Image: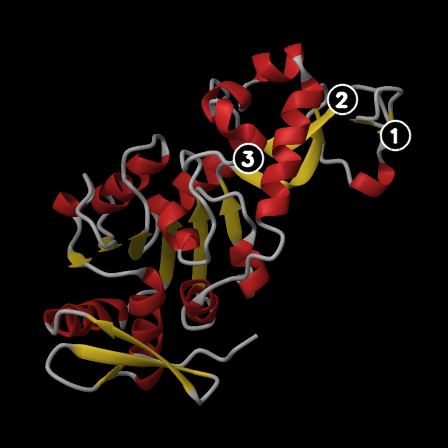
Amino acid sequence: MPAVGILRLISDDSFVLPISGQYFCFCTIPRSIFARLQSLISNLKSAQRVVALTGAGVSAESGVPTFRDAQTGLWAKYDPTQLATAGAFARDPKLVWEWYEWRRAQRRDTQPNAGHFALAAMAKLFPAFVIVTQNIDGLHQRAGSPDVIELHGNLQRNRCSHENVIIDRAQARTRNDGLLACPRCGAYLRPDVVWFGETLPRDALERAFAETTRCDALFTIGTSGIVEPAASLPRYAKRAGACVVEINPEETPLSAIADVVVRGKSGEVLPEIVERLEKGD
């Protein structure tokens, strides 16, 4: 995997990202971003507990399609919001499983990006650092982040549709119809993700709110700030006295409550934050 370097200022508004010491990816970012980063670093110097809330924008930089991106091939005629439901699974589990295997295949070669690796590095800079993610791709863990709360589950895991326990694929039984079944009760296995109409995993949600209400700083990164209950986490952190930082190319409903707003992609902004924290700037 290529080693990704740190953004370097090369003119008033242009920066360069070294990759493996020899390739360069040029980008243009407003110079004011660095003034905001300086303010942010000052706020973070005394932080003990930090939470990073991440959304689809973080993984989009790795080429992960968002849930509502256009379907392709055989799946173009299907509405994903109609497939990702318990009702659809009850009616036609084979169809739903075929769709999820297609989604898994789409992501098989996806790799963590500079933003994922920067967050993993940040975990070493604070006594307590937790990622709360709305993403189901597992890229934070693959980048090395040690503490990740997955609000919407994980696409690569399976669980029993009856007992709701995680079942490793190697332990599963195969039914006569070719689908995987729970070795304990015989019920179909299903992807360990949250479907439309379902509640979020209680343990994950309770811990997310617990970490949020006692953190010193909360980053909201690449999230729309619309989907609840995740969208409420920054507001709870703000009320509890935390510094709220938004990193997003676009304005969101969370922009108004953020103490620091940085308009940019996480893969460009987060490595710069890590370097400044490590240097003590």
- Up/down of 241 relative to 7, above or below: above
How far apart are the two marked residues, 2 and 3, measured between alpha carbons? 27 Å
Is residue 212 at least partly visible in the picture?
yes
Q: Amino acid at mark 2?
A: Tyr
Numbered circle sitting on residue 73: 3
Q: Position of residue 249 (x, y in %)?
A: 23, 54
Number of dots carrying numbers: 3
Residue under label 2: 188
Q: Looking at the picture, tell me which residue is in the foreground, 167 or 211.
A: 167
- The residue that disc 1 covers is 173
- Labels 2 and 3 touching (C-beta < 8 A): no
Q: Amino acid at mark 3?
A: Gly
Q: Nearer the viewer, residue 156 or 144?
A: 156
Secondary structure of the residue carrying tag 1 is strand
In the visual, does 148 lie left or right of 180? Answer: left
Residue at far front of view = 73
Q: Position of residue 228 (x, y in %)?
A: 34, 30
Secondary element at image label 3: helix
Q: Looking at numbered disc 1 in the image, what kind of residue is underneath it?
A: Arg
Disc 2 versus disc 3: nearer the observer: 3
